Amino acid sequence: MARYKNKRKLTLWVFVVYVLSFACYVPALLKQNGMIVPNGLLYLKYFYVCIPAMAAVFLLICEQNLKAYFTRMLSGKITIKYILIEVICMAAGIAASDCYSFIVKTDVFKNAYPTAGSLFTSCIYLLTTAFVEEIAWRGFLLERLPFQKIKSVLFAGVVWAVWHMPMWTIRNSLGMEQIVCLCIWTVLVSAVLGITYYRCRNISLTAMMHAAFNVCYLAPIQYNIAVLAAIFFAGILFFRPSASAVPKGRETGPLK
């Protein structure tokens, strides 16, 4: 699949996603500021995670390109190598969380998942939402960016981080320092997911990795950034792209 040339249409997609996603949190914002809002409107926030994928699917239907894109998103083979990478990422997150638990003398996993049932439910929910997000951000946006690979990965990460702003500011009421750290974390996660997607071309794998980051990395965000940055740079040093994973129309060789 050749590089996507219609930058104007892609820019419009990002704009529409931002506007509609923010609109999902407007009722909650109004209620926080003392306005009376019907309770039914507050449920709009649950559509937030679906907006990018819905906008992507709508555009693909208009272009009569839906089947081709979904075939593309799921075309790669998930090999033992990629499963091992995911296991390493999960183990690093669990280890970092355990170290933090030991330092502060509290069990962050027990606090987050008090029962096996809550852990199972969280895993299913986070895997589902991760798959929906991956349809939009890796399967759609990353495929269409007209830059070289590493620029595309970083650009997609920045766009994805900005998309999280309504959730961080309105739902979670976070301060600027926390938001900055979360932006760095989100770009790093996006880089890992983006490079993985370039290697294997299967959003099922990136969705599993995405969910694993949400489930396993429970230490404060500063710890997680350090751990994931180490994994990311180690991966750049030790892993090279597979020739079979490089699509037609994109340059071969290392990410650049």
Image (cartoon, grey):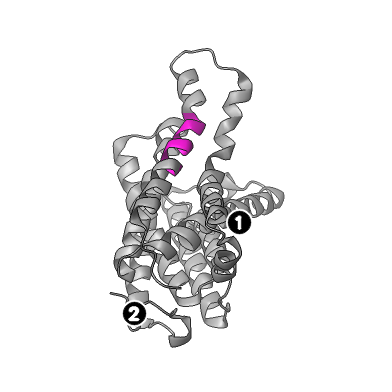
Which residue in the rendered view is the most extreme toward the bottom?
Answer: 243
- Comparing 29 with 126, the one in front is 29
Magenta: main secondary structure equals helix
Q: Are marks 2 and 1 in contact (CB under 8 Å)?
A: no
The amino acid pointed to by label 2 is Glu
187 above or below 231?
A: above
Residue 52: % across, % down? 50, 48
Determine which quarter of the picture holds residue 169.
Answer: top left
Quadrant where the C terminus sits is bottom left
Q: Which residue is at 53% across, 44% downward?
A: 51
85 above or below 21?
A: below
Q: Work out how far the residue at label 2 is from the one at label 1, CA to CA, in angstroms.
A: 31 Å
| Mark positioned earlier in the residue sequence (2 or 1) | 1
- Comparing 106 with 179, the one in front is 179
User: Circle 2 sits in a helix, a strand or a loop, which is it?
Assistant: loop
Task: Residue 19: say if magenta.
Answer: yes
Q: Which residue is mark 1?
A: 127
Magenta span of residues: 17-25
Does residue 222 appear anywhere in the picture? no
Q: Which residue is at 30% across, 70% downward?
A: 148
Disc 2 crowd rating (10 Å Cα; few below 14, some 14-19, many 20+) is: few
The amino acid pointed to by label 1 is Leu
Task: Residue 5: say if magenta.
Answer: no
Residue 138 shown left or right of residue 117 in the figure = left
Q: Which residue is at 30% across, 66% downward?
A: 147
User: Residue 251, labelled with which disc?
Assistant: 2
Determine which quarter of the picture holds residue 68.
Answer: bottom right
Q: Which residue is at 34% across, 68% downward?
A: 230
